[in-house]
Image (spheres, rainbow, N blue to C red):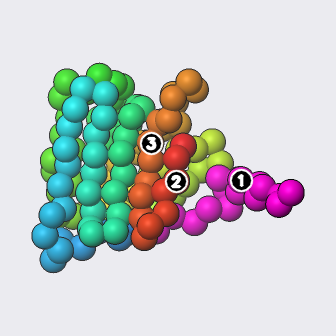
């Protein structure tokens, strides 16, 4: 019987999320319990847990209001991923988006990039 590969720990996964304003389709889509950020033809982040935009208060689902639209067409300059599952995107204009792994019974967010999906 073939062995099943062991999952890789979060701290070993390097996430690179490019955002190119020259590529059409950069968008943010909102639903009550899901926020979908589309960065380019190969990269998207679906948020189903709590997040914080800059110094704003944290937003928890269901999302009834958000300022995430101000990130559309910005360029991600740096990505940080903590072992506790917290994802932080830093943008070239100084803004930041922090996504928390705060849904113990459900996925908090999902990153799809270059044919690979990472679920946290």
Image height of 85 relative to 71, above or below: above
Image height of 118 relative to 31, above or below: below
Q: Is residue 85 left or right of residue 78?
A: right
SS state under label 1: loop
Where residue 68 appears, as percent x and y from the top left, is 21, 44
From the viewer's side, name the closer residue of 109 and 94. Answer: 109
Query: Residue 38 bears which disc, if any?
Result: none
Locate residue 95: give its quadrant.
bottom left
Q: Which residue is mark 3?
A: 109
Query: Residue 7 bears which disc, if any?
Result: 1
Q: Earlier in the sequence, mark 1 or mark 2?
A: 1
Q: Is residue 33 left or right of residue 109?
A: left
Q: Earlier in the sequence, mark 3 or mark 2?
A: 3
Q: Which residue is mark 2?
A: 118
In magenta, the rendered stretch is: 1-16
Image height of 42 relative to 63, above or below: below
From the viewer's side, name the closer residue of 86 and 57. Answer: 86
Q: CA distance from mark 3 to mark 1?
A: 17 Å
From the viewer's side, name the closer residue of 113 and 72. Answer: 113
Magenta stretch contains residue 3: yes
- Location of the N terminus by quadrant is bottom right
Q: Earlier in the sequence, mark 3 or mark 1?
A: 1
Locate residue 78: give its quadrant.
bottom left
Q: CA distance from mark 1 to mark 2?
A: 11 Å
Q: Is residue 8 left or right of residue 55?
A: right
Residue at the (49%, 63%) spot, across then down: 116
Where residue 43 appears, as percent x and y from the top left, is 35, 63
């Amino acid at each position: 019987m073939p062995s099943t590969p062991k999952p890789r720990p979060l701290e070993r996964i390097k996430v690179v999320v490019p955002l190119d304003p020259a590529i059409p389709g950069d968008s943010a889509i909102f639903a009550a319990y899901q926020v979908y950020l589309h960065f380019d033809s190969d990269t998207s982040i679906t948020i189903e847990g709590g997040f914080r935009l800059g110094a704003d208060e944290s937003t928890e689902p269901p999302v009834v209001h958000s300022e995430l639209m101000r990130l559309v067409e910005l360029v991600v300059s740096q990505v940080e991923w903590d072992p506790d599952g917290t994802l932080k995107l830093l943008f070239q204009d100084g803004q930041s988006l922090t996504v928390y792994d705060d849904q113990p019974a459900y996925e908090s967010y999902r990153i799809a990039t270059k044919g690979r999906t990472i679920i946290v």
